[in-house]
Amino acid sequence: MRAGARRQIDLLHTSNFLLLTSHFPFIISPMESFQRGVRLSILSILVNFVLAATKIAAGVFGTSYALIADGIESSTDVFSSIVVWRGLRISALPADEKHPYGHGKAESIAGLLVAIALIGAVVLIAVQSIREIVTPHHAPAPFTLFVLLAVVIIKEVMYRAVYRTSRSLDSLALRGDAWHHRSDALTSAAAFIGIAIALVGGPGYETADDWAALTACLIIAFNGFRLLFPALDEMMDASVPEPVEREIRKVAGEVGGVCLIEKCRVRKSGLGLLMDIHVMVDGDLSVRRGHEIAHQVTDRLLTSDLPIHDVVVHVEPAGRVVKVRSEK
């Protein structure tokens, strides 16, 4: 089967792969999810750019150093969104002579870069918050509260939209981009609470927004590392969850002539799976018949409800005990 056809099968069956791994249903088709993911990445770039400029301007005119720092941090989100957009586009390219297994790793690389960028943003926010705590400054202007409230609403809506699509595609890159939106919403909410306390409390409470931002950093850092380790696992070809392997063994074992599944090694590559499987057949069969069974296993897996890119089937002769067991 050609690589282009396999890619179409992969995208058509991504939904059931998600059901096996997380048991969260969704209502839009996998192809539509992929296209929506690309559109959301482009929208994220535009939203992050506009909000970064807005926060920096509001921070300058409203004497809110926390808002300026938040705006600078949002500008790094533009880079992250560009990385996600490019990663998704590249991962969708079909296999070629130079990349016989496809370009799925581009999505994993994008997920890794986004997770690192999220952790880096935490460091920047924390350093800036500590600097503002030890540096005396005036309380911000009241109008900055309305800017922050708008940012929180917009970013939370973006988080929910991007995260929902990341779940339907099982995309670490999109999930990381979603958490960039959530982290922005958290820091802006923290700044809102802190500025409100500073305005109500008066002199002596000017640093309240900085302390709130430091608290938000703990939540963001936790989720940054939670995204980092799965991305590293994908880069190092970690095995897929047990329910996925169990379903693969079941599908392959239902092919006529297969006595037993000896080995099954599966790894995730971008939005799909690469695998090799050892099937045991009657040792008295001809080479031609064994070859036919291997092709049937390959076809059954590629057309199953699993996002499989490529299958390598190795045929092993079954012993007498295995043959008797399979006949029963």
Image (cartoon, rainbow, N blue to C red):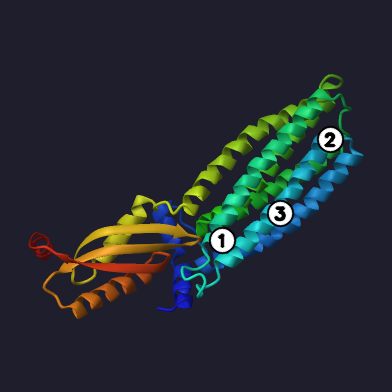
Q: Position of residue 122 (x, y in %)?
A: 67, 38
Residue sitting farthest toward the bottom: 288
| Residue 254 visible in this rendered orientation of the protein | yes
Q: Mark 3 and mark 2: span between their CA atoms?
A: 22 Å
Which mark identifies residue 79?
3
Residue 168 placement, left or right of 122: left
Q: Position of residue 92 (x, y in %)?
A: 55, 68
* Disc with the residue nearer the chain's start (1 vs 2): 2
Q: Which residue is mark 1?
A: 106
Q: Mark 3 and mark 1: span between their CA atoms?
A: 16 Å
- CA neighbours of label 3 inside 10 A, class few (<14), some (14 to 19), many (20+): some
Residue 168 placement, left or right of 255: right
Q: Please name the residue shown 24% across and 70% down the image.
A: 255
Q: Secondary structure at mark 3?
A: helix
> Disc 3 marks which amino acid?
Phe
Q: Which residue is mark 2?
A: 65
User: Mark 1 and mark 3 in contact (Cβ < 8 Å)?
Assistant: no
Residue sitting farthest toward the top: 204
Q: Please name the residue shown 62% across and 64% down the image.
A: 38
Q: State the residue in front, 79 or 153.
A: 79
Q: State the residue in front, 120 or 178.
A: 120
